Image: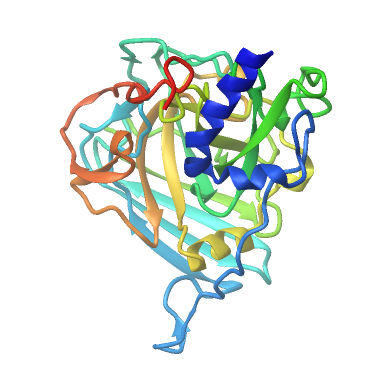
Amino acid sequence: MREGTTRMRRGLLLFGSCLLLAACAEPGDVGSTGAALTSVPELSNGRSTIEDRYVYAPPDEGSIEFDMTQGFCLPNEFCFRGLEGEVHIRIDYSKSANTVDLYANWTEGAYPYRQTFSKDFDDSTAFNTQPTTVSDGRWQMWMMGSIIGRYQENAYYDATTLDFIGTRYDFEPIGPRPWPPAGTYFPVPATATRMFCTPLFESNPDGSGSAHFTFNYDRMEDMMGTPGVIALIIPYNLCRPDELNNYWTQTRLPDEMYMSWDWFLESIWNGEGIGVASSYEPFPKPAYLAYRDATFIGWGNMYPQEIPRPMRLDMRSFGTLIEEDGINGQLDPWPAGSVDLCGGGL
């Protein structure tokens, strides 16, 4: 028992500075499921006090536009960085009409038509199965309402091994697994991304095309009619707190997780920004990808903090802007941890 306690203390020491472990003293103690930690400082209302106007995205009724870039990917994912053409996004929204319309237009070569792409290695984890090849696929876009900003979820860890064991969506009554015995696990708050998918689409044979999707302003649903998916970037073991990995919820989210367009506007005004990404999907999509994307990632961008072409985000260096390299292929995994808090101490 002493060894397990020592391992947990070492792990929490450094990981606390990364993920604000002071919040672990709040509801959701050791062995408690707790609730999602969503309390945040007061949000900005989006109105410029200098210009006396809404510089980005006025409330209730409006339109935003931006161009997509390549390389909007995480480590481990197959990342399209050598596509031709351009992709332009326009989003019109009306609270009075209860509509949000996403318009996408792209030029020749932007979204390849029914081609085959394969990864160099399997990026599946114990929580998410991933396809290694997609043939004769279709495309999908992902509306990202918050990007590692104000929204948090508890990540749960085994109190002895310090292994990540899941989120509340992996356990009953939402997920399939029973909770472990009280006192054998503890929560760590982690910032999360909330997103949902459009219906599948495809290009013309030359890779050009357009798409239009309409959502309800007050209840934005994915292709399956659900609230979508939550994604986290977390360590899978707290002994190596700076060794990160990708995680997506695997089960249907509860109804209280539906986003409205007001949530997107709050993210814009609050400085987090929103995003639109795209993925290349098996057709038809298998059941394990019902609510999340295949990790074959194409065009994407954020708003209002747009990434200009030919630059892309390098998430291995925590969002450094680097130039596109023109390669379609799988990205390296997240870097190995620089410390092992359970193998030798601080």
Relative to 296, does residue 262 appear above or below in the rendering? below
Relative to 96, does residue 257 appear above or below in the rendering? above
| Residue 141 position in % (x across, y down) | 47, 40
The color scheme shown is rainbow
* Number of marks in the rendered image: 0
Residue that appears at 53% across and 27% down: 11
Relative to 58, does residue 187 appear above or below in the rendering? above
**Camera-nearest residue between 99 and 324:** 324
* Residue 151 visible from this viewpoint: yes
| Residue 215 position in % (x across, y down) | 62, 52
**Camera-nearest residue between 177 and 67:** 177
Q: Quadrant of residue 254?
A: top right
Relative to 258, does residue 207 appear above or below in the rendering? above
| Residue 316 position in % (x across, y down) | 31, 33
**Camera-nearest residue between 272 and 11:** 11
The reply, left or right, for residue 231 in relation to residue 23 is left
The reply, left or right, for residue 328 in relation to residue 172 is left
Q: Quadrant of residue 345?
A: top left
* Residue 142 visible from this viewpoint: no
The reply, left or right, for residue 60 in relation to residue 340 is right
Q: Image quadrant for the N terminus?
A: top right
Residue that appears at 41% across and 26% down: 243
Q: Image quadrant for the C terminus?
A: top left
Q: Quadrant of residue 193?
A: top right
**Camera-nearest residue between 249 and 279:** 249
